Image (tube, rainbow, N blue to C red):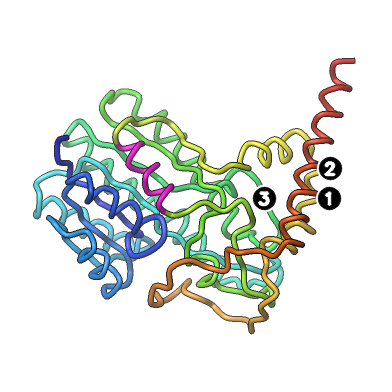
Amino acid sequence: MTSRVVVLTGASSGIGRAAALAFAARGDKLVLAARGLADLQKVAAECGGAVVVVPTDVSVRAQVDALATAALESFGRIDVWADTAAVMAYGRFEDLPPHVFDQVVGTDLLGPANVARAALRVFRAQDRGTLILCSSLVGHITAPNMSAYATAKWGLRALARTLRQETRDARDIHVCQLVPGSVDTPIYTSAANYAGFVGRPPPPVDSAERMGAAIVRLADRPRRALSVGAANRLVQFGFGALPPVYDALVGPLMGRLGISRTPTAPHDGNVFTCTPRVDGGPARLGRTAVGFAAAGAVALTSAGALALRKRRQ
């Protein structure tokens, strides 16, 4: 193995932290960035080896540019830049304060744009490099109470595809997307919330470590997109091929599976200020909720089979 220089934005928790540990185990040199210095230092200590820590808010372009400069000053190059920084807000669109909606989009869409701008500037000068943007299944579907996050992730998918088109002239510059399904990370419990109840990842739920390993795979063998999640294809199929069925099911499923029964007062979560990392979230569901998920999957699959049969007749 050859040692790479890897910049990770969003490295203090969740998928970013898991990716940092996976790259460190490989022997890569790391530049870790997120808003919270204390959590970044904890991750750096877990990684060991050659690690540089740079507190960075990806929604602030000057801070992202300073991060790129710090990486170059420390190691002379950037081989891989993976961006997993994200925030989330729960609540109906009309109930979300406009400033919360705007900041979620600012972090989850304009943040990656700032990262891509800085990374591509370095990659063009080097004539090589791999940019990995962490999207979401919600970048391919929509769900009630997640308007800001879905808007940002759909925009991110458009940005990534455009960047791939614009870098076709540089064969050694790669723009990749990781598309996770539900992942057991703190983003659900740290999200802004105007839905009245704490959010949680709907089943099936993957580990952050599986997503971190997927990011390393993309760095090793770049590809346009890597979707990781047992239900991703089924949900995308329902959204695209069976919109009436999907729209009828997604509200009840989201209400039962994506929102817990733990009440919460309206709050801005970590949208504007970082909070100390609390690993994981309320990922475990009772038997009733799991049965509800299975029933929804059966209904979606049955409707899909019926639709395909009618097309063939």
- Residue 279 found in image quarter: bottom left
What residue is drawn where x is 28% and y is 25%? 170
Label 3 amino acid?
Answer: Thr
Identify the image quadrant of the C terminus.
top right
Identify the image quadrant of the N terminus.
top left
123 on left or right of 133: left
- In this picture, is 195 found above or below 32? below
Residue hosting label 3:
142
What numbered label is drawn on residue 244? 2
Q: Report the residue that reaches farthest toward the front.
A: 287
| Residue 66 lies in the magenta-colored region | no
Mark toward the viewer: 3 or 1: 1
**Residue 280 image position (x, y, % from top left):** 48, 66
The stretch in magenta equals 209-219
**Residue 287 image position (x, y, % from top left):** 73, 61
Residue hosting label 1:
248
Residue 273 vs residue 300, the one in the foreground:
300
What residue is drawn where x is 84% and y is 42%? 244
Residues marked 2 and 1 touching at CB (< 8 Å): yes
Q: Report the residue that reaches farthest toward the bottom.
A: 265
- Residue 241 found in image quarter: top right
- Give the spatial CA distance, label 2 vs label 1: 6 Å
Residues marked 3 and 2 touching at CB (< 8 Å): no
- In this picture, is 248 found above or below 127? below
- In this picture, is 268 found above or below 5? below
- Give the spatial CA distance, label 3 vs label 2: 13 Å
Label 1 amino acid?
Answer: Ala
Residues marked 3 and 1 touching at CB (< 8 Å): no
Q: Report the residue that reaches farthest toward the top.
A: 313
Residue 177 vs residue 167, the one in the foreground:
177
Label 2 amino acid?
Answer: Pro
